[in-house]
Amino acid sequence: MLRGNESVAYAFKLARIDVFPMFPITPSTLVPERISKFIADGELDAEFIPLESEHSAISAAIGASLKGARVGTATASQGLALMHEILFIASGMRLPIVMGIGNRALSAPINIWCDHQDTMAERDAGWLQFYAESNQEGLDLILMAFKISEDKRVLLPSMVGLDAFVLTHTMEPVDVPEQEEIDEFIGKKKPEYLTLDANNPATFGAFGSPSHYMEFKYAQYLAMKNASVVIDEVFSEFTSKFGRKYSKINEEMMDDADIVFITLGSCTGTAREFIKMKRKEGKKIGLLKITVFRPFPKEEIRKALKGKKVVAVIDRNISFGFGGAVYGEVAAAMNGMDESPKIVDFIVGLGGRDITFNTFEEVLSIAEKAMNEEVDEINWIDVDKEAVEKEEII
Amino acid sequence: MKEITRGAVVKDAGNSVVNKTGSWRTFKPIINYEKCIRCMICWIYCPEPSIYKEDGKDYDAPKEPIKKLPVPVIDYDYCKGCGICVNECPVKAIDFVKEVK
């Protein structure tokens, strides 16, 4: 039985990370706690670097990765936000750092509970993004993230999101692979890039003038395209070695579905049980879980949504002035489909508000209505709208 | 074709001299050696630094004995045209001329 944070820590241990720079933050603090214990007990041979901020922690991660070390770290929410400018440097310098995130809301008001606002705000940082539904997925995705990130066709950093508390602090049975199996699967890190070496001096983090900058960005764009291929390879290799199936999107009960719920992370389990219950009443609902958000699986989503009538996107984030981030991306992915389904956005579960069967009842009733008539584009569920409107609407 | 390295790494050491920053210049400082008293204040202030000391005997000078002193010479490969030397020159011996490229 492992908490989500322990899954992340065990994955780092199995990956035999060399360096773990850190700054603690709720809800991911248990990750560094466990790593420090592994090191103190002699179970992990790694350098544990406590820093004075997350900004410094990710900077130290860059330095260590440049030296060729395998680097892991963990953060959440404000900590990830503080890392913001350095995230772009890690990806621009093409360093395969892997980071565990305890997906948590952003201030203000201060809130330590789950939503996806923190990682969604970093989706353009050039990092691969994975979202775990369970603690098992958290462990597996961290392990696979190292193999994907370190592939010479990719060389981009990865972040793996585990929902705050729902996963990070909740015990679940987790199958932890044997060390030998992981040694064989990931192997020792062979940096496929130039590293800091006194005998072969080079300049890292140099100036990129207008004559060259854009080419480096195009290189990152291509690396993300490559990542899409490498992810498929690594996922299928993992499945054949460990038996657990992974794909960029996970489709369930989709064959005859008219309405499709699109989810990320832990609320997928609730959605699955809800859909199974509703299927007994004859409702044709399907479930599409997005595991890989960057690179965004456009093709796969387009294929999965072919012939569907209504797509209900469950967004645990809000891009103010637009709607949910996932909604925007799915809508863009549907561009060019012969007969696009109607797409409706649902903003749910912000700041740790529970996502329950009642939430999905409301989602379903609006999605069903959308089959025959116009509905609102963006729908906030489980919100006391009256209380807010009294204050905000003049 | 440009050479684009992964992660923008500059593979060889000591190559910043290849980057001729003189191309950034809009105004060009030109030393008028008939006025220059070779006080070397421009040489001290040049932040690049792209003003060098050279043997001065073959350069013009306001008075014959000054020719024995070293002379400041601007390296236009790296002079960015900041104008600090123009501003600091105590005898106004440096002209600042707009460059047309």
Image (cartoon, coloured by chain):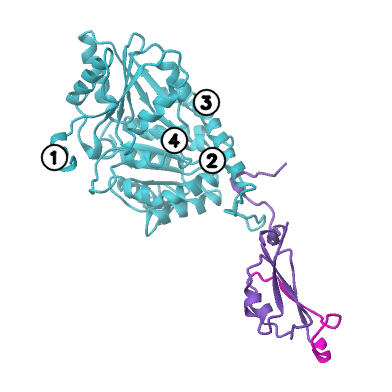
Chain colours: A cyan, B purple
Q: Chain of mark 1?
A: A
Closest to the observer, B52 or A18: B52
Q: Height in image: A46 above or below A358?
A: below
Q: Which residue is mark 4?
A: A143
Structural crowding at the residue carrying mark 2, measured as other residues with C-alpha within 10 Å and reported as few (<14), some (14–19) or many (≥20) = few
Q: Are marks 3 and 1 on the same chain?
A: yes
Q: Earlier in the sequence, mark 3 or mark 1?
A: 3
Q: Residue furthest right?
A: B58
Could you say where residue A314 lies in the image, as x and y percent from the top left? 30, 27
Q: Chain of mark 3?
A: A
Could you say where residue A157 lies in the image, as x and y percent from the top left? 48, 41
Structural crowding at the residue carrying mark 1, measured as other residues with C-alpha within 10 Å and reported as few (<14), some (14–19) or many (≥20) = few
Which one is in front in this view, the residue at disc 3 or the one at disc 1?
Answer: 1
Q: Earlier in the sequence, mark 2 or mark 3?
A: 2
Give the SS element for disc 4.
helix
Could you say where residue A358 lies in the image, as x and y percent from the top left? 17, 24
Q: Amino acid at mark 1?
A: Lys
Which one is in front in this view, the residue at disc 2 or the one at disc 1?
Answer: 1
- The quarter of the rendered structure image containing the N terminus of chain B is top right
Q: Which residue is mark 3?
A: A233
Q: Amino acid at mark 4?
A: Leu
Mark 2 and mark 3: span between their CA atoms?
Answer: 19 Å
**In the image, A3: left or right of A20?**
left
Q: Height in image: B39 above or below A125?
A: below
Label at residue A390:
1
Give the SS element for disc 2.
loop
